[in-house]
Amino acid sequence: MPKPDTRRVAEHLLQATPERIYQQILPETKPPTPRPRIDTLGAGDFEIVGFHPPGSEPLPSFKKRGLFLRTRRPAGLPAFNRNGEGITSTIAGVRVHPPSTPGQRLPDEFVVTATFRAPKQGLFTPSEDHPIGADDHPGEWAPVIVAFTTDPELAFFAASAQFREATPTRPEGMRLNAPGTGTPAGLANIDPAFFLAIMREPDPVTFTLVVHVDRSSDPSKFRANMFVEAQPAYPLLADPPVSIELDEVLEPGKIIEHIGAGIATGGGARFNVSVEIHEFEIWAKQP
């Protein structure tokens, strides 16, 4: 399926010849466990991680086109916050930075890409015991690239393709977002034609999130962008549309314990979301 030339994207962001140090091509895998095609990082197979409060029912499974991930958002969860409270998520990822295994540490500067397909959401099926209530509605949800840290003050940081409900001032759509980073709100929705192609049935197009982390500079930097098939969803400017200084979050001493891709919710009540992951890569500068 069409996707951006991730080698060229990584080269542009790293400003150097890139080396792919981890790659999962998920439609090529078979149960029970995906096997990485490339793993010079030494991170090993994917694990399912995330925030799974009671009722969220994570459901990973292999489909013909990729790894299918689902999460449910039950009623009664608090609002999203940066420590992971109020979130449901199902993330397929790798344990990349265990303190006891220095050889598996991520380099200070790296690029992560994740290619997705077929995002869907819907309300719970009503029943006699659980009819649809006045407060049941889809809320914030998004396919994500996410890194879980060991910092108790900041459980994760992420880039997401955030789905947004229609309001009196904007139509339904999706946009690039960076939950957990404190990024200013206001990035516009992607082109409606891109959004319709992503949601089209029975043959939706792929979309790819790209994250660039640089902890070798002072202050540290976090950058993100999004592509629809091979086309940038936002203009390729000198800096990507999300470009944030995150010195406290990403300083080299902070431990990144897992990094991966999946789907998450942060608002609303009693709805399901799902997505397929097709490919996951980590790039670094060639030695």
Image (cartoon, helix red, strand yellow):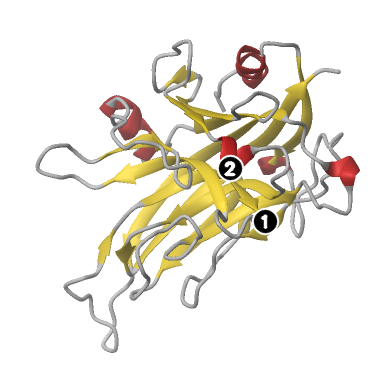
Viewport quadrant of the N terminus: top right
Residue 138 lies, in percent from the top left, at 29, 59
Q: Which residue is mark 2?
A: 249
Between residues 245 and 56, which one lies in front from this camera angle? 245
Q: How far apart are the two marked residues, 1 and 2, measured between alpha carbons? A: 11 Å
Residue flagged by tag 2: what amino acid is it? Val
| Number of numbered labels in the structure image | 2
Residue at 47% of width from left, 20% of height from top?
240
Q: Around disc 1, counting alpha carbons within 10 Å, would you say few (fewer than 14), some (14 to 19), or many (20 or more)?
A: some
Q: Is residue 254 left or right of residue 82?
A: right
Q: Is residue 117 left or right of residue 18?
A: left
Q: Quadrant of residue 203?
A: top left
Residue 118 lies, in percent from the top left, at 45, 44
Residue 150: image tag = 1
Q: Quadrant of residue 51?
A: bottom right
Residue 103 lies, in percent from the top left, at 90, 41
